[in-house]
Each structure stands twice: as C-alpha cells, then as structure tokens.
Amino acid sequence: MLAQGIKFCLPLAATLLVGCTGSIGGDGASAIDDSIAKSLCVVDTPIRRLTRFEYNRTVRDLLGDSSNPADLLPPEEEVAGFNNQAAALTSSDLLIEQYMKVAEDVSTRAVGNIEALLPNCDPELDGNESCASSFIQDFGKRAFRRPLLQSETERFKAVFDWALADADLGRFEDGIQLVIETMLQSPSFLYRPELGDQTPIEGDIVPFTSWEMATKLSYMLWNTMPDDALFAAAAADELRTKEQIAAQARRMLQDDKARDLVRNFHTQWLQLTHLDSLTKDSGVYPNYDNSIRGLWKEEIQTFVEQVILEGDGSLRTLLTADYSFMNEELASFYGDDVLDSVSGPELRQVQLQPERRAGFLTSAGLMASHANVNQSSPVFRGKFVREQLMCNTLPLPPNDLVIEPPELDPTKTTKEQFEEIGANPACAGCHTLMNPIGFIFEHYDGIGQWRDQQNGKPIDATGQVVQTDDIDGDYDGAPELARALADSTQVQECVSSQWFRFAYNRSVTSEDSCSIEQLNDVFRASDFNIKSLLVALTQTNAFLYRRAVELEPDAAGGAQ
Amino acid sequence: MLKGTLFGGTVAIGLPMLDAMLPVSGAAQTGTAPKRIVFWFTANGTRQDIWSPPANMDLNGHPLHAAMAPFSNKLIFLDGVDQSVTYDSIGDGHQTGMACMLTNAEILPGSLFCEGNCDAGNEQYVGWGGGQSVDQYIADEIAKDAVTKFKSLELGVQVKSSSIWSRMVYSAPDQPVPPREDPNQNFQDFFSDIDSDPFALRLIQRRRKSVLDAVMEEHAAFQSRLGYDDKQKLDKHLQSIRDLETRLAVTTNFGEACSSPELSLPGGTFQQNDMYPVTGKAQMDMLVMALACDLTRVASLQWSRSVSGVRFNWVPQTLDEGHHGLSHYDDSNANAKADLREINKWYSDQFAYLLGLMDGVQEGENTLLDNTVVVWVNELGKGNNHTRRDMPFILAGGCQGYFKTGQHIDFGGEPHGKLLVSLTHAMNKPVSTFGVPQYSQGPLSGLAL
C-alpha cells in the first residue's frame, strides 16, 4: 500500500534522507475512496490534556476570563515542532500544583461577578440550594463539555455544602467558587476523553457520542470549547453523520474563533516564535530595531489568516501571492517592494512587486528568522524549505564536526562564502540539499530586505534543487521557486501531513495510509484549499471512529 | 524579614514566629541541621584546557574560578570523570549528556525527538530519559522520614522549551520534571505562607484539602472509564495530587537561619535574554532562602537548556553569537576561546555567589554550605567536539563532613555513575549502583573523608 521506503512511522511523516545520500520516492495517491471499510485506518489517539493555548481560550469562553491564566503553567513538551502532541504531553508535580493555583485565581475572579454566573437565579429569591444546583448542572455541562453524571452533581453539591458549612466561609459565593475551583482541576475539564459510544458499528469499532464529537470539533478547529450551537447539536444528538459533522465544520470555519487555529498552526509550522527572541547585529543592519519583530509576525499571521479564512484559501496563494498586509512602518521597511502607499498603524492589504515577493516564504519575518545575526543564511533557509515544506528530515551535523558560519568577508558575497563551505566533502552530502535552495533566497538579506548587490557584486539568486520528488531543476529567485513549490505534489502532501499531525495531535502511523490518501485526494480536488482540507480532516475514519475502550492491557497487542 | 522587589515595588514580608502552627519539627531549629544536596547545571561544556585548579588549590588569579578562591578549602575538583553511559546510549551528544547526566541510564527508544547523529541505518528518533535521576531518588528516600514543604525544588533560568535537550531531572523513566522558571511565581509559592496570619493559613489549607479531596474522587471515577494506556497516564496525575495534598498540610518551621537577602524580582521580563543574570540571581537568592528555611532538602538550579543559545551581552564578547554557536568554533579560534572563557568565568562567579550566600547562613557550628553538597554538572565536557569525557564536575560543601574537601582529584576515566553513587552515600541514602550497574560500581574512591 505504501510506496517503498516511505517512513510513515516518523513524526513528520517525513521522507527521510538517510545519510543524505538520496531521496526516497513519494506516494502515488489512488482515487478517492469514500467507501473504505470503517474498520480500516482507525487509529486511537491517547488521551490528551489541554495545552496552555487551549486552556486560555477555554476559560475565556467558559467564564469570560481573558487574562491568559494558563501562561503560568510549565511549557508543553514539544515534539518535531508542535506542542500539542498527545504522546509527548506529560504530567508533573509542578503542573498539578499550578493547575491548583490557576484554578484558584480564575475562580476568585469569576465569583467577583456572581450575577453573570447565575443569570437566571437569585439566591436571595430562589434560595441557595436551588441556585447552587442549577449552577452545578449548567456550568458543569459547559466545563465538562457534557451533561454531568448524577454522582458528579452530588459530589459538587457536597463541595458547595462544605463551603457553606465552614465557619470561615459560609457565603453563597464561597460555595460557587469552590465548585468552580474543583471543576477546573477535574480531569473532565483538563483532559479530552474520547471514549466512544457503547455500541460497535462493526467489529470493535465505535463512533463517538455527539458530546464527544462536539468537543473533538471545537478543539480541532477552534482550539477551545464548543459554543452554544455545538452544544445544542450535541444535546439533539445531531453530530452523528458525516454530513452533520461536515456542516458544523464548515460553519465553524466561518467563525472568528477559527483565526486562533490558523494563527496557532502557522506560529508553530512557520516557526514564528523564533521572532520573539531574535536579535540582529546593529552594525551590519542599522535599519533593524527589535520593535519591528512584532510587526513581521503580525504581517505573516494576518496574511495566512486572510488567505485561508477570507481569501481563496489556496496553498498556492499562501506560497505565491503578490500581496501582503502592512502598516505604514512595515511598508516603509519593505521600501520599493510595496507598490501601494500606506499610512497609519493599521495593517491593510498592499500590492507587492511580483518579481520580488511571493507569499509568506519571502516575508521579512521568515527571511530574518532564518538568517544569522549579521548575514543571510542559505543553510537555514534551505533547511526550512526542506523540513517544513517538503517534509524531509535532515540530520544535524555529526557529533565531531566543528560548525561555524563564515566570518564576514567584504570581498565576497554570502553565496560565494557558503559555496566554499558546501564544497567541503565532509559537508557536501547534506549541504547540497540545503545551500542551493538557500541561494535562491539571496536577494533577501539577514533582515529580509531586498538587495540587488552585496559587497559591490551583483546578487546571484540561482540555485539547483536536487533530490526532490518533482521539482528538481535550476531556479533563479524565490518567486520562481515558490511557484514550483506550490505545484509540487511533495509539498502539497507535506502540508496536508503537517495539518494532520497538528489537528489530530499525533504523528502519522502506518495505519493512517488510507486517511492520508483521502486527505490528499480532497486537497487536490479542491485545488489545494486549506479549508477543504480542514473539513476533510473531520471525515476520515481516524477522526470519526475509535476502537472500543479496553479496560485491561491487550495481551494480544492488537489495539495499540 | 524577607524582602522582595516585585514589579518595581518592594514587598517586605515579616517572618513571624509561627510556633502555634508548626506540626513538623524543624530540624534547623533543633540543632541538628539536615543534609542537603543541590545540583547546579550549566550548558555547552567548558574550557577544559584551563578548567583545572592549580596543585595547591589556590584559585586566586585562576582564569575561570578566581571568585571561588575564598571557598577553595570547601571544594573538590573532579578531573577525568567520564559520562561513559552516554556512549552506549542512543541520542546525540547533547541529548545523552543531558538525559544521562543525573540518571546514568540510557535514553529510551521512541519517536519523540530527532537525533542529531545521523549515520545511515541509525535510528533517527529517541524518547525521554530512561531512569530516575539521582536527586529524585534521594528526595524520595528523604520523604520517607521527613516531610518538607517541597520534596524537591527544581529551579530553572530561561530553560524555556520542554524537550530531551532541556530536561535533566526525571521522577521516573520517561517522566521528565520541569523546572520552576518564574521567580515572581516562586516567591509566591515558596514564601507566601509567611505572609499569612496563622488563621488565614489554616483556612487556605482547609479549603485546598476539601477541593483536592473532591478532585481525587473525580479522578477515581474518571479513570475507571479509561482504557489501560490512558489510565497509566492519569495515574501520575493522581499521584501528584496526593503528594500535593500531603505537602500542603506541612507548615514549615522557620528556624534561626531562616532569613533572607533582599530580592530583586524581574517581573514579566524574566525570560528575556538580557534578564538572565537578574533572573538567575533571584532564583539563587530564593534557593538559599528555601534551603535555610528547610522548605526542601533536595534542589537543582538549571541555567538554560543544553545547546543553550543565551547571548552573554553582559560579559566582554568579541563574537556576536549565542553560547552554543560560540562553543562550536575550532580550538584555533582565539576570539571564540576568549568569549567562552568569559562565559564560563561568569558562571563561576555565579557559583561563588551562591556558595557565599550558603556559607553566610549559620546553622549551629556549621554553615549551610558545610551541611550541603552542591554539584556542578554540565551535559558536555567541551562544546565543539561534544565530548562527554573529562566532565567539568565540581563539588562544593562537605555534606556534613562526608566529603574530603579542598582537593583536586584526577580519576583517569572513571564513569560518572560512581559519582552519583557517592552522592547517595553522602546523603545517607546509600546504593551500591545507580542506573546502569556497569558504570556505577560503588562510590568514587578518594572523595569521602
């Protein structure tokens, strides 16, 4: 089923460049097949806890608390570039202690406005008991993303009662606060259990309950809890069929909350966090000031958000668009590259010289974060294209190799210097894969500004791309390369696998081959529309089904 | 008085006499101060060529360790100790150096982290560290007969991300322990009790117990519905809640020695590169305070992650590069060598500052430093060749007369697992081997009195 040599077990679903001696061929997708047996390509995801990003958005939607309280929690374990991978997220004493502190802070703030928590109940009029009970039911359902069990209702009522009976507490608000505090530390809030329905539809394959499906959809497409419409659909048990689920997914992608998803994904995929701590040599780059980093990031974020959610949504546009989003300061940084005049601090769409700029690839932020402090870096840029866009895995240099970027030489161009390094036989094996791709970006200096010459010599932005599935050849300048990347099956399938890993919170396994094929088919059929890909991610067997929960370890080793 | 400067304003916290609320007998107050152990990590190797002390142990004028001269009779420099296990383990130099450092165990196979070393046919990916780290082992043993507010304290200075390259403490195989990186938060977590009147403190304890009891019931019910693998995952979470509840019930006895230097807290900037010294100092100040107050007996202070990219803008630097970049230049590059000397000297200055604080805390006839062993570790010997041989280990403090301090020993290639065994002996929790037995056959000879 798999093309020979594809290592789907790798977290990146990567084409592994073994020893950098040769590339391994791609997967030829067959025709879309919607009638795949439900028992195929069902791969269970381990239970996962909310990331800080998700926790913050969840309490925002649950309690109107926009203070990002989860920023206090320890950082997530990061695996192959993403911080939401279920297998890697561990628990620690510190995390559990901070969950407590965060829950205390959030609940203290929440009962500061008790009326907002209880819009339909007044303890003075309706009585403490009655208001507490209805709060536990209503709030509990939103916090746990499902109706509470009777035993849970009783447990939280006991917490409330304890507070009211305590000599030093005793107020209605105290009871409500303790209930919130307890719920926010409960596993049903902190984790996303997807246990499935009781009744198998085929063998040991079970679908998810509508409540579970609402949660799966909202965390996948919004990185937060379900909204009222999803809860209503869950209550009506209307998240069962593929059509119902796809309709919700389409609705959700129209919602503002989808921006969180798009920004979160691209922050990680395009490694935008590099920008937060970037520094540049002010001697070499007098135009650079740390304050521009935020604008660079916002430009890329706005661009991908607009293209995907409000534009044509196409991967081709992401890679090749001759427009971007800038304010006056940013436009002035880009100089002649910007064809429109811009004034004021608000970002707006601007036309760019198409022979100079193409999509996010040539944005100043991306070019600057893949550069050295005092010069461009063909290595970092080539590596970025290889790893993030083509899903190649490049090894780090061998242990015993001494690596250093060349010192600035005023008589040479950066390309000339890196060509010398690349010619070293010890380096050539890997660097022929990276450096020539990086050379194609040589018109952008270490802070991403366009240059026609360096050290008095004209820029040579030609480079030879080798060992790819489908875009080997000579290129001159990034826009030309970007167009080739946009048309490359290898790139298209890489992007779809990156979204797979991010959306499903896990790596691609060998059992995912039919899901991967489905996704790639849909992606291709939609002319590589990211929104279509996202909807398709809700339609695979991997998303729709799981194997029935086994309460004891499987002696035969079948399920996992 | 505990004093802290928080977000520009000074918070002064009175140290009340808390006799009424002390269920635990504070060893520091009863005359027999406890033994403590502290691990101190810096990254990217050192300047091995100038690291050793002179034969007479006079550190005055030493290119790296001059600031430690006042404490030279309380130090042991270990030459010729290798992280041998790292050469058996999967994983690249930094990964093995980091994950094997305190575990003496090989890294687990897995598909989490890409391995740097990529010979054809090699496994490319590795999992987390494969053993409990020695600090956690000692902490678990101590916890069997003495409950402190924290079983152990892991402090970090701009460690930031969580990965095989950034974790050195493991509570068990596959269970990395993150350090506490926010000094502002730490100040609250460690010392806020002191601010509360006993009455308010009891109420907080009562509330938390009530909430955590209910949370644990929730966990039990929740787990009963999970499959086996998920259940395993949640077990750790539940155990952490149990431990938390136990710890919260502890009220610390603040002894005579429990007072504090003034604190300068970095506010929201603690992760910014140029705040590295300020953040580090706040963490050191609080670490010493926490030890003096017997909040814990096992601690670590981790300066950045392995492959540290910190830019040392506050020490003289010729090359405008981060630490890891600098550590990769060839030995023939005089500028890089000078920069690395300054960086490692700065770390020695910090170490001396910590030792000074600890030696200033009187505990009966001894000082806190005398009752402690501080262990300076590093994931590498030297950066540019990633060697894990001849590690730059330094011990400071005699651990209540266990170690024969004031000496420099060349062990000629002994495995570092034996040092870990020595530490368990020093802390009265002796084991015969630790981690991989082959590399930890008994303690290193010559260290103990």
Image: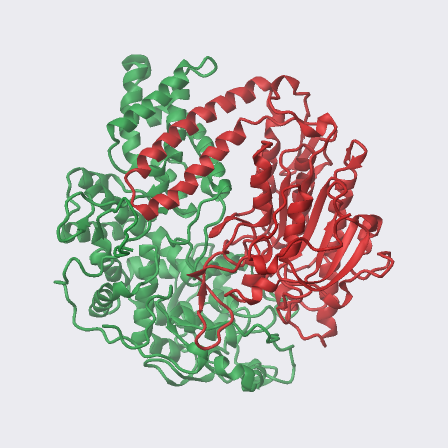
Is B110 drawn above or below residue A338 in the view shown? above
The image shows residue A344 at horizontal and vertical percentages of 47, 55
B70 relative position to A53: left or right = right
A316 relative position to B360: left or right = left
Quadrant position of residue A327: bottom left
Which residue is at the front of the view, A259 or A179? A179
Residue occupying the point 68% across, 20% down: B17
Quadrant position of residue A414: bottom right
Which residue is at the front of the view, A554 or A186? A554
A128 relative position to B45: left or right = left
Residue B98 appears in the picture as rendered:
no
In the rendered image of this protein, which colour is used for chain A?
green
Residue occupying the point 35% across, 53% down: A261
Quadrant position of residue B289: top right
In the rendered image of this protein, which colour is used for chain B?
red
The image shows residue B186 at horizontal and vertical percentages of 59, 38
Q: In which quarter of the image is the N terminus of chain A?
A: bottom left
Which residue is at the front of the view, A233 or B166? B166
Is B76 drawn above or below residue B284 in the view shown? below
Is A270 drawn above or below residue A111 in the view shown? below
The image shows residue B233 at horizontal and vertical percentages of 38, 46
A527 relative position to A399: left or right = left
Residue occupying the point 52% across, 67% down: A368
Q: In which quarter of the image is the C terminus of chain A?
A: bottom left
Residue A444 appears in the picture as rendered:
yes
